[in-house]
């Protein structure tokens, strides 16, 4: 009897600003597969907890909430992210500073992390799944048919972030962003739980200087080779 383990998975991991979310959405759309934005899940738990009046230090209640989270990921006609919590479009709501702070709080709770691990694996359904995050290929989907570690130079990622912030009317120096990204890379790679690193069988893809279309096509080409 076939099961979830027979459903193909493309795992796309990488540091902040590498473009993994954008590429994952494009690949999922092109292939008609399900999409998992693992990085958004902690924000979604924080938002749902706020809506339901659950304290952010109540590990038991938060774990139960995480286990039954009704979430769907997708994109609009232009390829921009769309996230639904139950039937509510929460794409903008989960990107607030308040939600980010809440996400940091719930991410430190082991019962929540365990619950979300099972939730993430539940996204694996036919015809396939594209999962993006930091430990998709090393921890969550170790048997993924294609593991991609998407990266870019710290300066390239800082330039992308700088452009995004400018478009939102936020003024910040490029040098400061570069320093922040390098420091975050160091913390993520040195942490004891699920450190940021490529899986041993991952394909490394440097997106520096490459267009979104070119990077997307590279992933699709790699998948077609399997």
Image (spheres, helix red, strand yellow):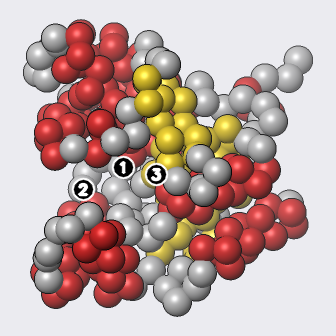
Residue 220 seen in render: yes
Vertical placement of residue 71 versus 10, above or below: above
Expressed as whole percent of the image width and height from the top left, the position of residue 188 reads: 28, 61
Expressed as whole percent of the image width and height from the top left, the position of residue 114 reads: 37, 26
Vertical placement of residue 211 versus 161, above or below: below
**Viewer-nearest of labels 3 and 1?**
3
Q: In the image, what residue occupies the spot 59% across and 47% down? A: 76
According to the image, label 3 marks what residue? Answer: 133
Labelled disc at residue 191? 2
Tell me if label 2 and label 1 are in contact, CB under 8 Å.
yes
Crowding at dot 2, Cα within 10 Å, few <14 / some 14-19 / many 20+, comes out as few
**33, 225: nearer the viewer:** 33
Expressed as whole percent of the image width and height from the top left, the position of residue 226 reads: 86, 60
Dot 2: element:
loop
Instruction: Work out how far the residue at label 2 is from the one at label 1, CA to CA, in angstroms.
Output: 7 Å
According to the image, label 1 marks what residue? Answer: 194
Which of pointers 3 and 1 lies earlier in the amino acid sequence? 3
**48, 117: nearer the viewer:** 48
């Amino acid at each position: 009897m076939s099961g979830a383990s027979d459903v193909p998975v493309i795992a796309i991991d990488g540091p902040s600003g590498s473009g993994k979310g954008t590429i994952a959405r494009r690949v999922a759309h092109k292939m008609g597969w399900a999409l998992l934005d693992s990085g958004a899940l902690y924000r979604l738990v924080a938002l749902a907890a706020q809506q339901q009046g659950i304290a952010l230090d109540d590990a038991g209640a938060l774990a139960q909430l995480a286990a039954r989270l009704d979430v769907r990921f997708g994109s609009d006609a232009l390829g921009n992210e769309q996230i639904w919590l139950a039937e509510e479009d929460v794409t903008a709501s989960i990107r607030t500073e308040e939600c980010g702070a809440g996400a940091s709080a719930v991410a430190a709770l082991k019962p929540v992390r365990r619950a979300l691990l099972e939730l993430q694996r539940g996204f694996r359904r036919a015809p396939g799944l594209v999962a993006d995050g930091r430990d998709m290929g090393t921890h969550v989907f170790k048997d993924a048919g294609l593991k991609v570690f998407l990266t870019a130079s710290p300066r390239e990622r800082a330039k992308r972030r700088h452009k995004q912030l400018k478009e939102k009317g936020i003024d910040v120096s490029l040098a400061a962003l570069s320093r922040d990204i390098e420091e975050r890379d160091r913390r993520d790679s040195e942490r004891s739980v699920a450190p940021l690193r490529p899986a041993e069988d991952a394909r490394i893809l440097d997106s520096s200087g490459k267009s979104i279309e070119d990077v997307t096509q590279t992933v699709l080409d790699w998948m077609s080779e399997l």
